[in-house]
Image (spheres, rainbow, N blue to C red):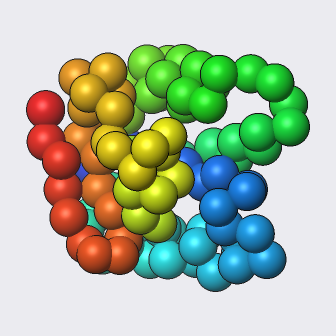
């Protein structure tokens, strides 16, 4: 059996809006194409009052994920990929397809 690195998806509901299912399918397709074992999508809802990346960082650590896949950088505060996240896992965007490596 061949080892495949783990990837997580990340979506903000306020950014995806009604396109959330489409964004999730794009994340899953990219993970599959890149050969990741896809563990699921962390969905952040800004109305919950938690820090945006708190749950994502915990899941990355617990699952020892190699990558986080997002629809685009607009799903992060200020449209910037957080360095604190890149320190834990590679961040891959679907549109445009780009990888921010550790």
Tell me if 72 is positioned left or right of 46 in this view. Answer: left
Residue 102 in view here: yes
Tell me if 46 is positioned left or right of 10 in this view. Answer: right
Compared with residue 58, is residue 36 higher up or lower down, i.e. above or below? below
Tell me if 35 is positioned left or right of 71 in this view. Answer: left
Q: Kindly identify the residue that appears in the image at 65 percent across and 22 percent down.
A: 51
The location of residue 26, given as percent across then percent down, is 49, 77
Q: Kindly identify the residue that appears in the image at 63 percent across and 43 percent down.
A: 42
The location of residue 68, given as percent across then percent down, is 39, 45
Tell me if 51 is positioned left or right of 81 in this view. Answer: right
Judging depth in this view, the residue of 92 and 46 nearest the camera is 46
Q: Quadrant of residue 85?
A: top left
Quadrant assignment for the C terminus: top left
The location of residue 1, given as percent across then percent down, is 27, 51
The location of residue 29, given as percent across then percent down, is 44, 77
Judging depth in this view, the residue of 35 and 25 nearest the camera is 25
Q: Quadrant of residue 18?
A: bottom right
Q: Kindly identify the residue that appears in the image at 70 percent across and 42 percent down.
A: 44
As drawn, the residue found furthest toward the front would be 78
Residue 59 in view here: no
Judging depth in this view, the residue of 62 and 102 nearest the camera is 102
As drawn, the residue found furthest toward the right would be 47
Q: How many marks?
A: 0
Q: Kindly identify the residue that appears in the image at 45 percent across and 28 percent down.
A: 60
As drawn, the residue found furthest toward the left would be 102
Judging depth in this view, the residue of 1 and 49 nearest the camera is 49
Compared with residue 77, is residue 15 higher up or lower down, i.e. above or below? below
Compared with residue 85, is residue 1 higher up or lower down, i.e. above or below? below
């Amino acid at each position: 059996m061949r080892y495949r690195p783990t990837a997580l998806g990340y979506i903000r509901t306020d950014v995806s809006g009604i396109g959330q299912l489409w964004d999730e399918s794009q994340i899953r397709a990219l993970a599959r194409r890149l050969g990741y074992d896809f563990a699921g999508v962390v969905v952040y809802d800004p109305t919950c009052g938690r820090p945006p990346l708190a749950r994502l960082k915990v899941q990355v650590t617990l699952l020892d994920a190699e990558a986080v896949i997002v629809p685009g950088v607009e799903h992060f505060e200020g449209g910037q990929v957080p360095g604190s996240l890149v320190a834990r896992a590679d961040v891959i965007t679907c549109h445009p397809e780009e990888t921010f490596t550790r």
